[in-house]
Amino acid sequence: MKELFKILFFVRLGRVLSCFFLIHFAVSASAQTTSFDVSIPWLSPKYVPHSGEFIYIPAIANQGYDQIKPHFTWRHKLGGVSDFNVLVSNLTFLSATQEDLTYLTKFQIDVPTSIQYTSKVSISRGIRSVTVSLFPYVKNNGVIERVSSFKVQLQATQQVVKKKDFVASSVLGDASSKWYKISVSEDGIYKIDKAFLTSMGINVAGLNPSHINIYGNGTGKLPEANSIPRPDDLVKNDILVIGESDGVFDDNDYILFHAWGPNRLKQTTGNLLTREMNPYSTVSCYFIRISDSDIPARISNIASEGTSTTTVNSYNYSVSYELELKSLVGGGQIWYGETFDDVLTRSFQFSVPNIIATEPARFSVSIASNARTSGNQAIFSIGSEVVSTNAIPSIFADYARSVYTFNKANPSASLPLTIEIDRLSPAVVTYLDKIELNARRGLSFVGNYFYFRDLNSVAAGNISAFELLNLPANGFVWDVTDRQHPKRVNGNSAGSVYQFNLKTDSLREFVASNGVSFSVPSFVGTVQPQNLHALEYADLLIVTNPAFVSEANRLADLHRSQNTTVHVVTTEQIFNEFSSGSLDVTAIKWFSKMFFDRANGNPDLMPKNLLLFGDGTYDPKNIVSNANFVPTYQVMNSENHIDALVTDDYFGMMDDNESLGNGDDMDLGIGRMLISTPQNAKEQVDKVEIYMKNGANLSVGTTDCCSGTTDTSGTFGDWRLNYVQIADDEEGGYFIREDCEPQFEHVSANHPEMNADKLYCDAFPQVSGAGGERYPEVFDAITSRVQRGALVVNYVGHGGESGAAQERIITIPQILSWTNLNKLNLFVTATCEFTKFDDPKRVSAGEWVALNPNGGAIALMTTTRSVYFDVNSTTGERFYENVFDRDAEAEPLTFGEIMRRTKNTTNEGINKRSFTLIGDPALQIALPKLRIVTDSINHKSPNLVNDTIEALSK
Ligand SMILES: [Ca+2]
Ligand SMILES: [Ca+2]
Ligand SMILES: [Ca+2]
Ligand SMILES: [Ca+2]
C-alpha cells in the first residue's frame, strides 16, 4: 500500500492564489456571442517526491491533474438560462521548459497537434457556469509548446427548457388497490394461473379477472446520464387474460404477460448487439394490482401494414456467456468469471441452429490480465482452427482490460470456442469477463420461444415482410418493441411459413412462442401503499435500509426540532417507484432529482442534503457478502484499485446535463452513515444528538442532554475553536510544506479566531522497536488532542485501511480507546483507502473513527480509495477555504455544504470523487454560533455565549 501510495502521491500545485486574479478577462459581447481572453497562469515547476526520488512537475496556479496529465480548467459564471456553444481559438504559445519535456516523456503522455478541450455549462443549485478544460500542451510543427493563452467564445443557443416529467402521485399510492410484487430473471412470456394467485394469498373465488393489471418498466440498469429518458413511477403493461369475459377467474383461466429480465440487449457500432449486464440486480420486478377501478390494459393486435419493400427471413442473433464470480480490485461495476491460472485452456460451446453460413460469426471476448511484461498471448480457436491470436497488454499495476473481437467465416451451427492463455510466467493471471457471439440466423422457430430482430430491415419507408418458418400450431408472435405494450401480430400461415408485413423505419423486436410452454415468475411479497411522488419539498432526504427506519426517524425528529424539514424513506420504497422494484442505485439519485426538478431552478425549493443511512459494499448482488444496506455507486472501471472508484457524489448530480463528469457540479450535500445493525444506528444517532445539543446548537439554549448523557460540562471550553494538523514525516517534508503549512496560513489569514495545534512527526523523536519504527509521543499526542477536543482533526500522509503512517501513529485499537463523546471532531484524512467503507470483509480504520460509540468523530471527510498525484493537496486547500466559512446568515455550514463547495471548486479529475463525507450532511459544524470579531475582545458582548468567552480568554 505504502509503496504504491508513494508512487502516486507526489504532486501538489499552486497555493491558494485565486485564479481570477491571474486570469485577465477582456470581455466583448455582441447580441449572441460573448468572448473572453484567458491566460494560463503557469508557475515554476514543483519539485516533488516520486518513487524514492525527486522530480520536477509542471504547475499552474490553482489547477490540478487529470490522473497523470496536467490540465487547466477555466470557469466563468453565466447569467440567464441559455445553453451555449463553446469555441476555443486564438491560441498563443510559450516554449515548453526542459522540466515539462522530461515530465511528458517520463509518463509517456502523448501531446496532440491541436488543442484538446472539453466544455460544459456546469450548474450548481441553479447557478450556471461555463467551464473549459484543456490539456495545456500542443505539438506545433513537431515541437511541444505550452499553451499560454486562448480565446473562449460563447454563443447562446436555445433556451434551456426544464423537464418536469415526474407524476404528482404514484400508482402505488392507491390504498384501495392490493399490490403484489413478483420477479423474473429472464426475458420471456410468463404465465400466472389460479394456483399462482392463490399462492400469493389472493382469494380467487370472487376475483373478476378484469380487476387484474400488471405494472413494471423492464428498463434494465437505469441510464447514468440524467439526459437519457426513462419511465417514471410504474407503467401499466398490456397483458393477455384468458377467460376474462365472463367476469369469473375459472380454474383454467390464466394471464400471459411479457416480462423483461434485468439485462438488456443493446445495439452497438458495427451492427452488433451486446448484452448490458445489470450490475445491481439479478432480477427484474413487476407488480400485480388488484383493483376494481383500474382500467384493464390488454394486449391489442396489429395487422399487416401495406405492401412490403423488403423480406426478412433471417435475423441478428446474439448470445452472451458471463459468470459473475469475482471483483478484481474490490470496486467497480464489472465482475469477472473464470480464472486462467491453474487452468490455462477453457472451452465454451455455442450452438446456433439455422445459422447463415455466408455471414461470419462474430465473437467478442473480454478479459483482464495482470501481465507486467509483453509477450503473453490470448489465443482463440473454433474447434481445431485458430481464429485469432492476440497480445495481452502489460500494465504497471493491477489489471489491464482487453476486448478482443474476431470472426469465424463459414460458421456451422456448432461453434466450440476455446480460449487459451499462453503466458510467460506463472505470475500472469487472467480472468474472463464475458463472451459475446453475434451471428446471422435463419428465421425459423426454435425452442419454446425465441426473440428475433433484423438490423438489416431498418430504413426510412421500409415495410418488411417477415417470413417465419415452422411456427407451431398453437404458436404466436408478439411485437415487444414498445417495452410495456406488446402487441399480438396478426400474420398469415401458408404451409410452413408464417408471414406478416410491418413498417421497419426503426428496429422492431419480436418474440415467438409455441403457445404451450411459458415461464412462471417468482412471488416477492405484498406491497403496502406508498407515495413518494406525492411528497412535498424537504431540506433533508434520509434514505434508510428498512431495518433502520426507527433510528432514521429519531434522527429526522432531531433535525425537525431545528426547523429542518425531513423525509425518511426506505431503499425499498425508492426502488418501487424509481426502478420498478429492483435494486438500482440510480433510483436514489432519481428520487432526489424529483424534488430538484420540481424546484424549477429556484435554489430555495431544492433539497439541501441527502443522507444515506446505511453502510454499503461494492457487491450489490451479494455475490461474496451480504452487507449492502444502502447501495453504493461504483464507476465502470473495475481493473485498477485507484480508478475503480466508489463515490456518493453520483447521488448529488441533479442537472439534466450531468452524470459524473469532471465539470459536473454537485447540487446536494451528500453524506453516508456507516450503519449495519440497529445497534450501530442507535449509537450513531446518539452521537448526532450529543453533537447537536452540545455542539452545533449550544448557543440556542439546548444544553439538556440526551441518551443518558447528563454531564455536559465537557462540551464547554475551547475545543470548538481548535483544529489539529497531523503530518506524516515521509517524502522530505512534503506533507508539511505543501499541505499543512499552506492550509495553516490560509486559516490564519482568514479565520484568526481558530487555533492550530500542529503535530508534525518530524518534530518528535522516532523510536526503533521490535515492531519497527514508532513515534510514541505522536501516538500519545494524537490521543490527547482527540480527548481534549478539537473541531477538526486532520491527518495527511501515508495510510491505509488499518491506520495511518508506517510508524502506526493512528491504529484501530487506539481509535477505539477514544472517549471524547462531548467533543466529537470532524476527522479529515488525506491518505490512501483510510476509509474504504465498501469492503464487506473488513471495517477500515476510518470506519472505526465514525463507529466508536464513545468518541472519535462526528463525521469524516476521507478517502475511500487511493488518490492520484495532487488530489489530496488541492482538495485539502479547497476544504480549508470552506470549512470555517459561514453562510449568508452567518451560520456555520453543514457538513454536506462544506463537502459540496469543496468538490465543486476543486479543479481535478474524477479521482477527487474518492473523498467522501461519512456522517450526517445536514449537521452544522460546531463552530461557535456567534461570529467572533477582533474588536469584541475588550468589549465583551452580553450576547457572547459562555464557551466563546472561554475560548477567547484562553
Ligand atoms: Ca372465466
Ligand atoms: Ca462480467
Ligand atoms: Ca449540478
Ligand atoms: Ca463498511
Image (cartoon, grey):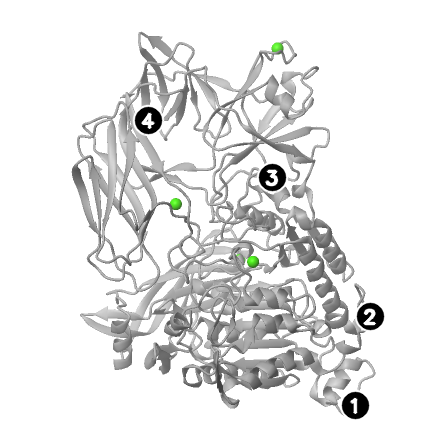
Find disc 1 in the rendering and name its residue: 939
Q: N-terminal of the two: label 3 or label 4?
A: 4
Q: Residue extending furthest bottom?
A: 938
Q: Which of 811 and 460 is in front in this view?
A: 811
Q: N-terminal of the two: label 3 or label 2?
A: 3
Find disc 2 in the rendering and name its residue: 710
Q: Can residue 561 be seen in this view?
A: yes
Looking at the rendered image, the disc whose residue lies closer to the viewer, 4 or 2, is 2
Q: Image quarter for residue 707?
A: bottom right
Position of 77 relative to 200 (above/below): below
Position of 296 relative to 761 (above/below): above
Q: How crowded is mark 4: few (under 14 residues within 10 Å), some or many (20 or more)?
A: few
Q: Where is residue 536 in the image (x, y as percent from the top left)?
A: 70, 48
Q: Residues within 10 Å of mark 2 (few under 14, many from 20)?
A: few
Find disc 4 in the rendering and name its residue: 461
Q: Is residue 627 left or right of residue 927?
A: left
Q: Position of residue 936 (x, y in %)?
A: 75, 88
Find disc 3 in the rendering and name its residue: 576
Does the CB distance between marks 3 and 1 fall below 8 Å?
no
Name the secondary structure under disc 1: loop
Q: Quadrant of the N terminus?
A: bottom left
Q: In the image, what residue type sits under mark 2? A: Thr
In the rendered structure, find residue 322 and report the number of the disc placed on it.
none
Ligand 1 quadrant?
Answer: top right
Q: Residue at x 69, y 53 (%)?
A: 678
Q: Which of 563 and 602 is in front in this view?
A: 563
